[in-house]
Image: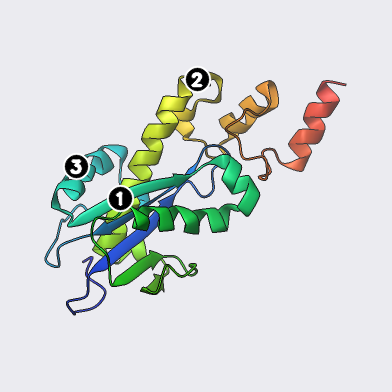
């Protein structure tokens, strides 16, 4: 069962990101402070949930949370500071927007850049262990998915409404055919080396 990290009266904020491995679009992060006794049988790591389940949980989390916030770092910033630092920055921006100041940060993963003077604990696969991190994962994922569906209307040939910017075979096939756009992360390898060579030979 997902739980609180400490059995103390500390105000805990769970933090998680979505879109770190994508080829296009921003990385999103969320910070969520839940009531100590919050429980929901459906809440889990967002990657283990269906889109329908995530969308069902989102309004519940937003309603029941003591405080929550979502923020993003765009692809230009990602290219400038790298995706790891961009993920931390997105979490910091989400924390900046919280209406309640946390006393402990629960971070999904094994690394984090310290936020102010607040104690933090990094937890590998924390989104499958702690409710506040799982809630943050749901918010980050759903808000990012909504964003990618919106920009899909501008760039329908990349099928972001389906792949959300991840490195699927179809996404890479469309990059080969149409090239990259202003939302692609130029610091990422958009195509494997062999595909780039084959593409160049086909067009020689």
| Circle count | 3
Crowdedness near tag 2: few (<14), some (14–19) or many (≥20) residues, C-alpha within 10 Å: few
Residue 136 at x, y = what percent? 31, 54
Residue at left offset 14%, top offset 60%: 39
Which of 164/16 is in front? 16
Q: Is residue 52 above or below residue 4?
A: above
Residue wearing tag 3: 59
Q: Is residue 179 visible?
A: yes
Q: Nearer the viewer, mark 3 or mark 1?
A: 1
Residue at left offset 38%, top offset 57%: 16
Q: Is residue 45 visible?
A: no
Q: Which mark is residue 69?
A: 1
Crowdedness near tag 3: few (<14), some (14–19) or many (≥20) residues, C-alpha within 10 Å: few
Residue 177 at x, y = what percent? 68, 22
| Quarter of the image with the C terminus in it | top right
- Viewed as shown, does residue 199 lie left or right of 50? right
Q: Is residue 78 above or below residue 130?
A: above
């Amino acid at each position: 069962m997902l739980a609180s990290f400490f059995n103390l009266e500390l105000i805990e904020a769970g933090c998680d990101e979505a879109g770190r491995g994508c080829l296009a679009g921003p990385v999103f992060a969320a910070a969520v402070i839940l009531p100590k006794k919050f429980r929901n049988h459906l809440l889990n790591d967002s990657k283990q949930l269906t889109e329908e389940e995530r969308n069902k949980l989102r309004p519940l989390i937003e309603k029941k949370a003591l405080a929550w916030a979502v923020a993003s770092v765009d692809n230009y910033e990602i290219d400038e500071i790298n995706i790891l630092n961009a993920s931390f920055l997105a979490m910091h921006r989400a924390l900046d927007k919280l209406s309640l100041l946390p006393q402990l940060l629960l971070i999904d993963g094994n690394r984090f850049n310290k936020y102010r003077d607040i104690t933090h604990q990094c937890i590998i696969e924390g989104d499958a262990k702690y409710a506040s991190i799982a809630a943050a994962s749901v918010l980050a994922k759903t808000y990012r998915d909504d964003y990618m569906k919106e920009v899909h209307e501008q760039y329908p040939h990349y099928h972001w409404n389906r792949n959300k910017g991840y490195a699927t075979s179809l996404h890479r096939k469309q990059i080969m055919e149409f090239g990259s756009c202003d939302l692609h992360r130029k610091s990422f390898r958009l195509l494997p080396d062999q595909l780039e060579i084959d593409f160049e030979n086909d067009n020689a």
